[in-house]
Image (spheres, grey):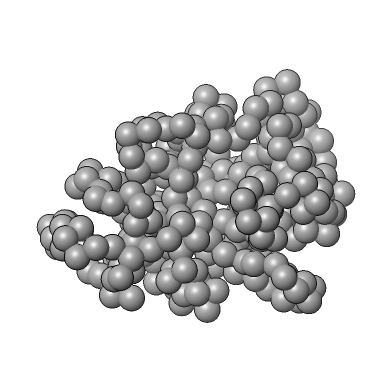
Amino acid sequence: MDKVILCSKEDPASLNIRERLIESFGFREDSSSMFGNPVYRRGDIRIITVNRPSIYADDEVSSIDAGLIVVASKHVSEAGVKAVLSHPVGNWGEKAEFGGRPSSLATTSARAIFSAVSKLRRLVEEAGLAGWDVGMEATHHGPYSEKPLLFVELGSSPAEWNNPKMGEIVAEACLAACAAEHVNAPEIAVGFGGGHYTPRFTPLVLQERVAFGHIAPKYHFPLSSKMIREAFEKTVEKPRLAYVDWKGINSEQRQKLLEELSEIGVDYVRL
């Protein structure tokens, strides 16, 4: 089944990445169009462009027939940190202020996230780019998707969003995510606890030891049984292992999490 790299006309980084895919990676305009925009294709990968911010594109995503959707996006950081990132999508709580559905996770692929982050690390190192962070974020925002979906992001200000070199690096990481099915990933897990930028989990990915699907940060605890179970069900590889940031969750909430993991037959690793 086709893979899709989803871009947004409302996102300058996304358009930069799209241009790099077309200019440098052999994509050609298809005879079809979607949402009033041309579709570009290379083999089994299509570039589809939506007209609004990708995080709100639930309806568009639901109409796309694809085995994987990789969203090329900008990243915004209040601290202005230069970064390239990947992350899964969904809302742990009852609010969906930034797209998606309340208390619902989008389906994601741990292998695709792992492949994107690994490629970003290699390309940033090979280019000798000082001052750039490579990493992951915890699961957050929309759109909701029943097809495996992840974000690959370029941040964190207009200078970076419009940087052609960095657009090309993120474009190549999007392609790596699309090829993740051919990668022998390490062990696959779900992460619980810690901060938004997953400080205990990201190093395991960068060391190519673990591929994470959904990650629930500490500020969304306590989690309901439904959401803990959904973290495993909505990671397409169906992991049976959890990594727990031990000090990143208070003891009472951690105990409830461990009881739920035991109930559903999931092992855990303490970090």
Quick check: can you spot residue 18? no
Q: Number of callouts in the render?
A: 0
User: Above or below — where is 12 with respect to 194?
Assistant: above
Residue name at image x 78 percent, y 33 percent:
30
Q: Which of 134 and 65 is in front in this view?
A: 134
Location of the N terminus by quadrant is top right
Residue name at image x 77 percent, y 46 percent:
158
Quick check: can you spot residue 102? yes
Q: Nearer the viewer, residue 84 or 220?
A: 220
User: Above or below — where is 215 with respect to 4?
Assistant: below
* Quarter of the image where one finds residue 253: bottom left
* Quarter of the image where one finds residue 92: top left
Horizontal arrangement in the rendering, residue 175 relative to residue 270 (left or right): right
Residue name at image x 78 percent, y 58 percent:
166
Q: x, y percentage for residue 5?
A: 65, 44
User: Above or below — where is 183 with respect to 23?
Assistant: below
Residue name at image x 55 percent, y 30 percent:
56
